[in-house]
């Protein structure tokens, strides 16, 4: 499709030069390419757009599925049927502002909506077919996956090292999640290195649609190398974990922090003086992570929500019981996302950073209990997840052997010399 568009545009530009007369062969070429372009663009989401009046728009503030359908003369019973019977496929309450949609209308004078297509993301979309008996289904565009290798040396931060290589910023998040249990990303050192192999997604061969999960990686932190290979740990549940070159699971029972790419503004300190209380000694039994209001707060481990409420100086908070030994609490939220009794998985968003309760700035106070006593989570030797089962190891070692060689062969970008660094500083 895109090559035809390129030819078409060139021909149109050429044809627009009025001083030049087109030869018959060129005219014939224009006609042929035009037919091809029209044929390709007329087919989208499995529908021939030539059969309809087409309206393309985005969801705006105040829009709802019901209102959009009523505006396009869809009967209320059909709207109710979609809302009630197809909630698992298309929850009409969850359409989001800014999301694109397409309405295919009848070509007669009524202009009644025949099909509603909602784009969930660049790849996935939902079709609501309003013709005859109402139906709804999900589908996706054809995606091409292209393997990409990348590497970097950290000078200031992981995100900057990744962006300097022209890599999708989401790879930063993916890499931090892979090593979330084994590397303290608040204490990265200048000169730490990484290599990563992942796939980029493209629609129609040329439209970039994001980065896929990391397939294998290498991170050198404080001189210590840590390999990571994605491998299906449980074929029945389709669970993929990351293991090192010795088949040890990189995951821990707990994440190191409840917020990504934040900073510790106050540590666990039983002798801390607090200005808010007249500079008197008040034990601080939590670890504060400063971040902008609205930053997602993550559950650091699987568990059941025992409290989701607001109380005194704690403000809005969530408390999670992980097992008979460990519990965690997250204070000063802007808003909670979970309710008491809910089971949450490690990494789930449970609320957002706020300033409720006694606080002088936006942060989450993270509290950690072991056997009913609050302790410093940064000093805890947290339990490790189970390693790969022995029967799976022979296949695993055979699977990662070529991937490790591929990682080892990836070269790092050149670092500036000290003199070059000084020149760069002077020129900034």
Image: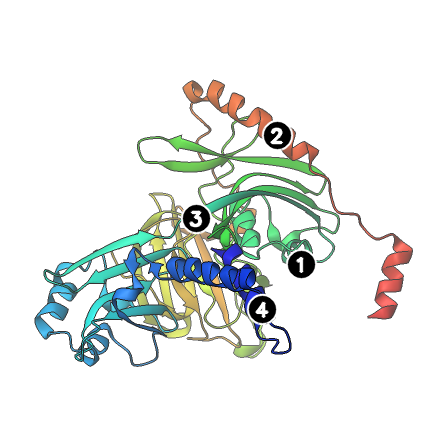
The image's colouring method is rainbow
In terms of secondary structure, where does tag 3 sit? strand
Disc with the residue nearer the chain's start (3 vs 1)? 3
User: What's the residue at 60%, 78% (across, down)?
Assistant: 18
Instruction: Mark 3 vs mark 4: give the one in front.
Output: 4
Disc with the residue nearer the chain's start (3 vs 2)? 3
Name the spot of residue 209 as percent of width and height, x first.
48, 55
In whole angstroms, how far apart are the C-alphas of marks 2 and 4? 58 Å
In terms of secondary structure, where does tag 2 sit? helix
Q: Does 78 sit left or right of 14 as displayed?
A: left
Name the spot of residue 357 as percent of width and height, x first.
42, 75
Residue 22's label in the rendered image is 4
Instruction: Mark 2 vs mark 4: give the one in front.
Output: 4
Q: From this viewpoint, is residue 366 visible?
A: no
Residue 404's label in the rendered image is 2
Q: On the image, numbered disc 3 is attached to which residue? A: 143
Instruction: Mark 3 vs mark 2: give the one in front.
Output: 3
Disc with the residue nearer the chain's start (4 vs 1)? 4
Tell whether label 4 touches label 2 (CB within 8 Å): no
User: What's the residue at 41%, 60% (across, down)?
Assistant: 35
Circle 2 packing at 10 Å, graded few (<14), some (14-19), many (20+), is some
In whole angstroms, how far apart are the C-alphas of marks 2 and 1? 25 Å
In whole angstroms, how far apart are the C-alphas of marks 3 and 2? 27 Å
- Residue that extends furthest to the right in the rendered view of this protein: 419
In terms of secondary structure, where does tag 1 sit? helix
- Residue that extends furthest to the left in the rendered view of this protein: 77
């Amino acid at each position: 499709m895109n090559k035809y568009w390129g030819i078409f545009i060139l021909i149109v530009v050429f044809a627009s030069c009025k001083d030049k007369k087109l030869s018959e062969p060129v005219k014939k070429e224009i006609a042929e390419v035009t037919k091809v372009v029209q044929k390709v663009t007329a087919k989208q989401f499995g529908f021939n757009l030539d059969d309809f009046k087409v309206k393309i728009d985005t969801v705006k503030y105040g829009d709802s599925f019901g209102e959009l359908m009523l505006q396009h003369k869809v009967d209320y019973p059909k709207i109710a049927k979609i809302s009630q019977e197809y909630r698992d496929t298309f929850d009409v309450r969850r359409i989001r502002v800014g999301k694109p949609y397409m309405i295919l209308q009848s070509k007669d004078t009524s202009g009644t909506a025949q099909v509603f297509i909602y784009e969930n993301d660049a790849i996935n979309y939902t079709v609501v077919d309003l013709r005859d008996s109402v139906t709804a289904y999900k589908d996706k565009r054809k995606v091409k996956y292209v393997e990409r290798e990348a590497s970097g040396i950290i000078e200031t931060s992981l995100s900057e090292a990744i962006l300097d290589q022209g890599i999708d910023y989401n790879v930063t998040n993916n890499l931090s999640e892979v090593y979330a249990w084994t590397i303290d990303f608040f204490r990265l050192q200048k000169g730490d290195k990484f290599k990563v192999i992942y796939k980029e997604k493209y629609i129609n061969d040329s439209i970039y649609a994001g980065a896929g999960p990391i397939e294998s990686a290498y991170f050198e932190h404080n001189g210590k190398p840590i390999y990571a290979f994605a491998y299906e740990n449980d074929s029945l549940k389709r669970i993929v974990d990351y293991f090192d070159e010795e088949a040890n699971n990189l995951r821990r029972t707990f994440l190191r922090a409840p917020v990504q790419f934040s900073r510790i503004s106050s540590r666990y300190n039983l002798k801390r003086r607090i200005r808010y209380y007249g500079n008197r000694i008040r034990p601080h039994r939590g670890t504060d992570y400063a971040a902008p209001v609205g930053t997602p707060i993550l559950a650091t481990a699987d568990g059941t929500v025992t409290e989701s409420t607001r109380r005194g100086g704690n403000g809005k908070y969530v408390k999670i019981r992980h097992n008979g030994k460990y519990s965690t609490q997250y204070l000063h939220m802007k808003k909670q996302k979970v309710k008491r009794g809910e089971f949450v998985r490690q990494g789930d968003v449970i609320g957002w950073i706020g300033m409720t309760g006694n606080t002088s700035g936006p942060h989450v106070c993270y509290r950690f209990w072991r056997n009913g006593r609050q302790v410093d989570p940064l000093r805890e030797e947290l339990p490790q997840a189970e390693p790969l089962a022995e029967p799976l190891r022979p296949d695993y070692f055979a699977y990662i052997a070529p991937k490790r060689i591929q990682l080892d062969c990836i070269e790092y970008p050149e670092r500036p010399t000290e003199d070059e660094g000084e020149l760069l500083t002077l020129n900034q």
